[in-house]
Image: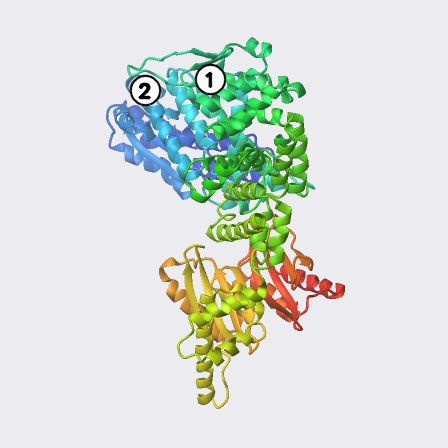
């Protein structure tokens, strides 16, 4: 005969094996709970202490609490249990708990336990709602059932009868803290399945409120059915079951209790659920769409369910304050509703009118109103969509309300937005599986609109001024809503413009408005991609952008759309560095559009102006002849792109370098040494980054070595301007992200300088050090989602340089590998830009061959692509 613990171990292992191999397991949490129940029941039957207590007439009961009480035991969930007594805890209680619980600890299970009397439970529940909600989940396991019933009866009579309203207020406050801590998981791409808004905790709040609103004899099924329709209740059960199943897979893969569904596990779970990669979407993206649809539905159901519960007067009586706000529409206890279902049949425009009032008043739709909207969506037909009155109401919601985001979110929840704009339904839950987008496409679009509307306030001074100067802000808001409408297609900006054109024509929108909105959708990536991937000192780049945009009004709207779109994408898509680049680009384009001239004056005039400014700040000890000779050594590109103050600083560094090299030559009899260079760093507070300036004797592969040393120290390069004076002096100006350790920045830069010197002298091998660094790899699950690398060679965008764009998955050593390969190819790098495109890094290099020419030979271009792609495959 097997002992209970041995039987439990064997049964759980069989259950886990069935679940792991994908065989039919109806509900792992319920079956796992049943196994634990059986263990307690079998153990108590064999317990000598339990028998002794029974013989002494001391009643006791084992009561499941929390997730165990709700039958939600996932693989690594805590098992919460209390040993309940009547009026007094006997001395044998400790021995009984040890006898029952020690074998569970030996099996490696996590336990939460306590020994309490009924009075203890009630006393704590009155002051601690965490305990109260745990008791609402209480479930009898074994022992004296009347004792358990006595606890539940007294809990309702002595605690819940007085604390139900306070409980609801406490849960509302908990929701706010959950939102602040874990975010709205129905929107996030790495959601917290339990604590995030839209997670299992939403269901728990519904359950606790449902139980608190009925008597102790009612089951939670009966409590739910008192407020939910049959279909809503079935949907609720399905949502909870789906999330529990995912959570159990997450526990299995992470080998621990874990509620955060991070990228590294999503691909594997998608495969386990039977999803497979499709032509237009990865299995993980399909899975993520299902997760977000489920969590959004659960959030919507939870908010509707809880909205009308326990809204009472100060005296605790339920209140009912229905008043008519329009023909066919009412408001009751802060919720909007319909007079009757027949009112919608008689006047389908009520389906949009209720949302218009929600946007105006800030009131949500009631559960019954949401139910009716869903039931009557079939009335949203072509004539409904083409009605000028209906479209006007929608534009009012979009443009004239401070509750636009909340109202559009409600439209999504009940399916109205998908019915009214079917094209939006195709991207609503579409997920881009990457490290940059934090929302599904539909919610990202809503956030873009939300951020644009916030510009009407005064929090963003420059952006606010631009917003109020726009003649047609409604066009910008339409573009914000539709800018990613083409994400279900290939080139989403181009496709999105065509789709937007179709929608707006259906709406009967005016021709000029359609033209502007479609332009904004078509070119909504122009500013960000140009600013982060092109040399903004290249006159041709600025002129090309100005020609595309064509007017100051469109430039302003495009700038604001770029800001809102990037901010809604996530923190990696918008930071101070990117913001400064885009702002500089916008001002240069504005200069052309307003004055009809190039962003800079004639090159020769500008060079002479810079020289005269440098002379005013001449370096002490520099003779005029020496200064003029220095000017002759400087390439025109350097003089045009560098401020006079920086030229003065670089001259000073060059003088120090020359003196150090002369001293070394004297000491070492003509050997200047390869480790001599001037290294300066300073914080760029405006761009929230660091600037590194290195002045050295030029040598092959210098920039590749610098990139390698920075990679070894986990410092990301944002941009690089690389100049070589005619006397062989290299002046490299790099901008980098902040070092990871803010407390020891000086030490970090000193280490970088020391390691660069060691690399240049050969005492430190970059290749061997890089080899150790490359032991870092993506997880197996995440590898399945990596995009295919690509290399683009562009000879059209610049008159003087070949532009090489390298698209690759992010890696700490990526830039070193590329620059080293370009060096081996005999290419001279003049500047570099590092940007992002979805989950890929885009490294952009302005290069020429060693003779100073563009690379235009087809075979040479193919060689460059082939060599770089070979390097990328090894990352």
Left/right placement of residue 205 relative to residue 85 reads right
Cβ–Cβ under 8 Å for marks 1 and 2 = no
Relative height, residue 594 to residue 850 (above, below): above
The image shows a total of numbered marks equal to 2
Choose top left, top right, bottom left or bottom right for residue 753: bottom left
Residue projecting furthest to the bottom:
669
Relative height, residue 559 to residue 750 (above, below): above
Left/right placement of residue 145 relative to residue 611 reads left
Name the residue located 38 percent from the left edge and 38 percent from the top edge: 111
Instruction: Please tell me whether mark 1 or mark 2 is closer to you in this view.
Output: 1
Q: Where is mark 2, residue-wise?
A: 160
Q: Position of residue 385 (x, y in %)?
A: 63, 22
Q: Nearer the viewer, residue 48 or 828?
A: 828
Q: For numbered disc 1, what is the local secondary structure?
A: strand
| Quarter placement of the C terminus | bottom right
Q: Callout 2 environment at 10 Å: few (<14), some (14 to 19), or many (20+)?
A: many
Name the residue located 52 percent from the left edge and 51 percent from the top edge: 587
Relative height, residue 76 to residue 413 (above, below): below
Q: Callout 1 environment at 10 Å: few (<14), some (14 to 19), or many (20+)?
A: many
Q: Earlier in the sequence, mark 1 or mark 2?
A: 2
Q: CA distance from mark 1 to mark 2?
A: 29 Å
Q: Nearer the viewer, residue 772 or 822?
A: 822
Numbered tag placed on residue 336 in the rendering: 1
Q: Position of residue 266 (x, y in %)?
A: 56, 42
Choose top left, top right, bottom left or bottom right for residue 681: bottom left
Q: For numbered disc 2, what is the local secondary structure?
A: helix
Name the residue located 49 percent from the left edge and 24 percent from the top edge: 301
Q: Nearer the viewer, residue 494 or 822?
A: 494
Q: Position of residue 695 (x, y in %)?
A: 49, 73
Numbered tag placed on residue 839 in the rendering: none
Residue 698 visible? The answer is: no
């Amino acid at each position: 005969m097997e002992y209970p613990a041995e039987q439990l171990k064997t049964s759980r292992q069989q259950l886990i094996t069935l679940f792991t191999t994908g065989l039919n397991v109806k509900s792992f949490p319920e079956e796992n709970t049943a196994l634990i129940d059986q263990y307690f029941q079998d153990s108590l039957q064999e317990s000598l202490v339990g028998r002794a207590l029974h013989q002494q007439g001391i009643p006791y009961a084992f009561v499941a609490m929390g997730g165990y009480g709700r039958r939600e035991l996932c693989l690594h969930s805590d098992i919460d249990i209390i040993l309940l007594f009547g009026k007094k805890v006997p001395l044998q209680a400790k021995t009984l708990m040890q006898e029952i619980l020690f074998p569970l600890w030996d099996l490696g299970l996590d336990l939460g336990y306590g020994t309490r009397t009924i009075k203890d439970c009630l006393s704590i529940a009155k002051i601690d709602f965490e305990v109260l909600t745990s008791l609402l989940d209480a479930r009898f396991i074994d022992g004296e059932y009347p004792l358990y019933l006595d606890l539940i009866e007294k809990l309702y009579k002595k605690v819940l009868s007085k604390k139900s309203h306070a409980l609801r207020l406490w849960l509302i406050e908990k929701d706010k803290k959950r939102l602040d801590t874990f975010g709205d998981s129905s929107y996030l791409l790495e959601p917290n399945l339990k604590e995030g808004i839209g997670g299992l905790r939403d269901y728990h709040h519904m359950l606790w409120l449902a139980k608190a609103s009925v008597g102790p004899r009612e089951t939670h099924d009966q409590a739910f059915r008192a407020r939910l329709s049959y279909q809503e209740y079935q949907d609720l059960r399905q949502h909870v079951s789906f999330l529990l199943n995912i959570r159990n897979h997450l526990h299995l893969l992470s080998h621990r209790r874990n509620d955060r569904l991070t990228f590294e596990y999503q691909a594997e779970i998608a495969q386990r659920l039977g999803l497979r990669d499709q032509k237009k979407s990865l299995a993980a993206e399909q899975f993520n769409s299902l997760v977000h649809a489920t969590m959004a539905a659960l959030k919507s159901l939870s908010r509707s369910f809880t909205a009308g519960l326990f809204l009472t007067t100060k005296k605790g009586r339920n209140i009912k304050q229905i008043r008519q706000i329009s023909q066919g529409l009412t408001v009751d206890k802060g919720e909007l509703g319909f007079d009757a279902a027949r009112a919608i049949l008689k006047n389908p425009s009520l389906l949009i009118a209720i949302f218009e009032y929600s946007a105006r008043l800030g009131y949500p739709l009631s559960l019954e109103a949401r139910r009716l909207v869903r039931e009557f969506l079939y009335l949203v037909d072509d004539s409904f969509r083409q009605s000028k009155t209906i479209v006007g109401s929608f534009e009012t919601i979009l443009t004239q309300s401070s509750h636009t985001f909340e109202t559009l979110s409600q439209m999504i929840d009940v399916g109205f937005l998908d019915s009214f704009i079917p094209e939006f339904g195709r991207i609503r839950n579409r997920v881009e599986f990457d490290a940059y987008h934090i929302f599904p496409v539909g919610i990202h679009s809503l956030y873009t609109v939300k951020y644009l509307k916030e510009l009407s306030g005064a929090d963003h001074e420059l952006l606010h001024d631009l917003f109020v100067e726009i003649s047609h802000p409604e066009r910008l808001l339409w573009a914000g809503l539709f800018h990613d409408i083409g994400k279900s297609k290939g080139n989403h900006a181009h496709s999105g413009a065509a789709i937007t054109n179709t929608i707006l024509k259906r709406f009967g929108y005016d021709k000029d408005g359609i033209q502007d909105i479609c332009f904004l959708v078509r070119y909504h990536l122009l500013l960000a991609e140009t600013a982060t991937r092109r040399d903004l000192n290249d006159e041709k780049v600025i002129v090309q952008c100005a020609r595309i945009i064509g007017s100051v009004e469109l430039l302003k709207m495009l700038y604001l759309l770029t800001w809102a779109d990037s901010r809604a994408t996530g923190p990696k898509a918008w930071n101070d560095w990117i913001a400064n680049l885009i702002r500089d680009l916008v001002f240069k384009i504005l200069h052309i559009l307003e004055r009809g001239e190039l962003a800079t004056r004639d090159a020769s005039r500008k060079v002479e102006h810079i020289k005269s400014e440098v002379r005013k700040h001449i370096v002490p000890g520099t003779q005029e002849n020496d200064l003029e000779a220095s000017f002759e050594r400087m390439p025109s590109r350097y003089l045009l792109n560098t401020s006079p103050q920086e030229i003065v600083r670089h001259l000073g560094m060059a003088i120090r370098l020359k003196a150090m090299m002369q001293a070394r030559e004297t000491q070492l009899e003509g050997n200047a040494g390869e480790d001599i260079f001037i290294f300066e760093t300073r914080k760029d507070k405006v761009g929230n980054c660091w600037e590194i300036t290195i002045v050295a004797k030029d040598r092959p592969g210098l920039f590749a070595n610098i990139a390698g040393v920075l990679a070894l120290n986990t410092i990301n390069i944002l941009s690089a301007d690389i100049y070589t004076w005619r006397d062989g002096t290299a002046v490299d100006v790099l901008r980098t992200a902040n070092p990871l350790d803010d407390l020891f920045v000086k030490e970090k830069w000193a280490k970088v300088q020391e390691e660069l010197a060691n690399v240049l002298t050969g005492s430190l091998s970059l290749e061997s050090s890089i080899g150790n660094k490359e032991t870092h790899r993506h997880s197996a699950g995440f590898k399945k989602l990596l995009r295919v690398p690509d290399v683009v060679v562009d000879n059209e965008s610049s008159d003087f340089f070949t532009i090489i764009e390298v698209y690759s998955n992010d890696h700490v050593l990526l830039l070193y590998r590329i620059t080293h390969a370009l060096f081996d190819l005999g290419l001279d790098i003049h500047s570099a830009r590092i940007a992002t495109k979805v989950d890929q890094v885009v490294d952009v290099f302005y290069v020429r061959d060693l003779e100073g020419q563009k690379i235009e030979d087809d075979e040479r271009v193919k060689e460059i692509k082939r060599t770089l792609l070979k390097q990328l495959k090894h990352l």
